């Protein structure tokens, strides 16, 4: 079993260190986590839309298909 601190794997601890690099307060950490969470959700929704429509955003495959993205 891998060495774990606070229940986190080594990779997760590396991520924690990266997140904390330029944070000076808990408010800084909360703001950064909020942006990361929002970005993660946005990417998940984009991937879901790509899967649903069958083509990636800005792809010419959706042109005049009757199922194209609106903006």
Image (cartoon, rainbow, N blue to C red):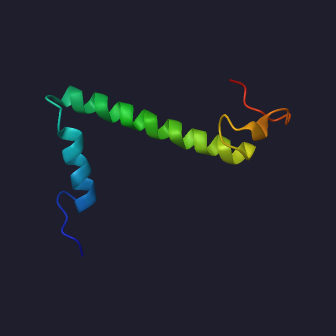
Rendered residue at 19%/64% (across/down): 4
Left or right, 31 with reference to 26: right
Rendered residue at 73%/31% (across/down): 69
> Where's residue 64, x and y in %?
85, 32
| Residue 8 seen in the figure | no
Rendered residue at 68%/23% (across/down): 71
Q: Residue furthest left?
A: 24
Left or right, 39 with reference to 45: left
> Where's residue 63, x and y in %?
80, 33
Nearest the eye: 50 or 30: 50
> Where's residue 67, x and y in %?
81, 35
Q: How many marks?
A: 0
Q: Work out whether 65 lies above or below 52.
A: above
Quarter of the figure with residue 27: top left
| Residue 44 seen in the figure | yes
Rendered residue at 32%/35% (across/down): 33
Q: Residue furthest bottom?
A: 1
Quarter of the figure with residue 53: top right
Q: Work out whether 49 lies above or below 5.
A: above
Q: Residue furthest front?
A: 60
Left or right, 61 with reference to 13: right
Q: Work out whether 55 lies above or below 67.
A: below
> Where's residue 61, x and y in %?
77, 41
Q: Quadrant of the N terminus?
A: bottom left
């Amino acid at each position: 079993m891998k060495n774990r601190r606070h229940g986190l794997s080594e990779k997760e601890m590396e991520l924690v260190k990266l997140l904390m690099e330029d944070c000076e307060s808990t408010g800084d950490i909360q703001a950064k986590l909020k942006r990361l969470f929002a970005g993660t959700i946005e990417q998940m929704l984009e991937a879901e839309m790509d899967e649903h429509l069958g083509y990636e955003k800005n792809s010419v495959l959706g042109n005049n298909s009757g199922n194209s993205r609106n903006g």
